[in-house]
Amino acid sequence: RNCIECLAQPAEAQDKVLKPALVCSLFPNVPPTIYFSTRDETVEKLPWEQRKLLRWKMCRVTPNIVKQTIGRSHFRVSKKSNDWLGCWGHHMKSPGFKAIREHQKLNHFPGSFQIGRKDRLWRNLVKMQARCGKKEFNFFPQSFILPQDIKLLRKAWEEGASRQKWIVKPPASARGIGIQVIHKWSQLPKRRPLLVQRYLHKPYLIGGKKFDLRIYVYVTCYDPLRVYLFKDGLVRFASCKYSSSMESLSNKFMHLTNYSVNKKNTEYKSNSDETACQGHKWALKALWSYLTQKGVNSEAIWEKIKDIVIKTIIASEPYVNSLVKMYVRRPYCCHELFGFDIMLDENLKPWILEVNISPSLHSNSPLDVSIKGQMIRDLLNLAGFVLPSMDSVASKTQTRNGSTCSLGSALKEKPKPVSEHLKAEKMKKAYYLMPKIPDQDFYSSVLDILTPDDVRILVETEDEYSRRGQFERVFPSHISMRYLRFFEQPRYFNILVTQWELKYYLNRHKG
């Protein structure tokens, strides 16, 4: 077996720690997952029969940091189009997900553009605000999508103060391309699709400069929903001191925080030290230390950020789940990293600016390498890549309900169940989906008798949690009950894992 205790290898020239190639499950009869190492570790080699299955599909956009991490686990580039286990590539149209085989993982979900495109994000958040109330969804600036909302924008413009500023963004751009800050109606381009937002004109400043936060959010599954936040991230500063004067609106180095914009400023200063509060890019942990020294409760800000992230992911949930059911063979096949851009106002309230479905993983400095390298390594361990059987790799056709690399024989995804068993599972799910409003007293008995499906989901959830590294799971958690009411429709597995967390979060071993 390759699930061995880690061994020190002092004889090695670089004195690296030898790590097992596979990580054992917490449970019997469940296959191990592939281990991804840090730069100061070396991973043992599997026997050739298993090692030859370690193939990765490379794309033009696969980041170097991903290539380096999979290389340390002895993955090779796949020359064929269908024998790979993992791929880090472009998002694609939903029907394209049908081509992903049951032992393969792609780093996107169908429909995630519902929050990854600026116009869709705002439409969905406004919809959530209308359904759940402004009090719960007041973390995004008032936004208008042109040309559809031109009359509404005109009304808001005329009602606003004459010194109101607006930020204009193309709906699907990145890296600050096409963004401008305006204050006159005549400056507004009228004929192209645009997102127009109230400009957050009173940002929290450090050293007189505005900044935003890049928060890394990882979703491993949408049913049940499992959302993680990486504990570190990036703080990106504008490279000119902030001024609220109208004359400064054209200065992108003052009003935009994108690295791709500010690196062009001769005043831009890089930062290679993840603990230092210097230059125009900091580690998120360095910001928390800085604010704590100023007497700010940085933990309270982090809690608010977690709340925003959960609600925003829930806004995409109905679209993604319906497309996963239509086009994806099994939930194992998809996972996704999102880059949330968040700004703090003068009262340290976090506001969501946008969500990126392919956040930049370019590492231009030791600071980037340190944060993104650790994050990608932990993400790939969380993803839970499993060695498939030789049969499944060789097979040209697979059914949507197969279980190539799910839980072991006792917990396979859909072993042909006895009809009574299946009927009992359906009845249990229907029973707990009856309440229109989430009801803790009603839900609390869901753990009394577990079905095979329940066991499979709970095993996956606990195993995954044990591999989280520097990620923090924010959903499900022991406070998830308060979020269930935001889902457009209740999901049985969300109820199940929420009740599990509530019961066992203080004693996971007992669970």
Image: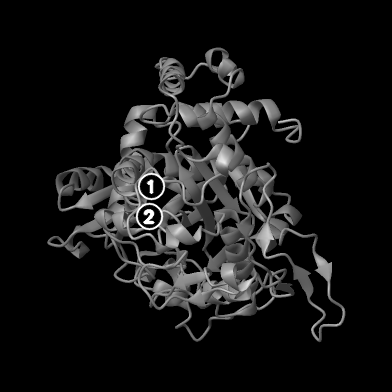
Residue 354: % across, % down: 40, 55
Disc 1 marks which amino acid? Answer: Pro
Q: Is residue 59 visible?
A: yes
Query: 452 or 428, which is in the foreground?
Result: 452
- Whichever of callouts 1 and 2 sits on the residue coming sooner in the sequence is 1
Q: Residue furthest right?
A: 10
* Circle 1 residues within 10 Å: few <14, some 14–19, many ≥20: some
Which residue matches tag 2?
199
At label 2, the amino acid type is Tyr
Residue located at (15% from left, 53% from top): 147
**Nearer to the camera, 57 or 202:** 57
Mark 1 secondary-structure assignment: loop
1 and 2 marks in contact (CB < 8 Å)? yes
Q: Where is residue 342 drawn, in percent x and y?
A: 49, 54
State the separation of the CA atoms marked 1 and 2.
7 Å
**Residue sitting at x 41%, y 53%:** 102
- The crowding category of the residue bearing disc 2, from other C-alpha atoms within 10 Å (few below 14, some 14 to 19, many at least 20), is some
Q: Which dot marks residue 141?
A: 1
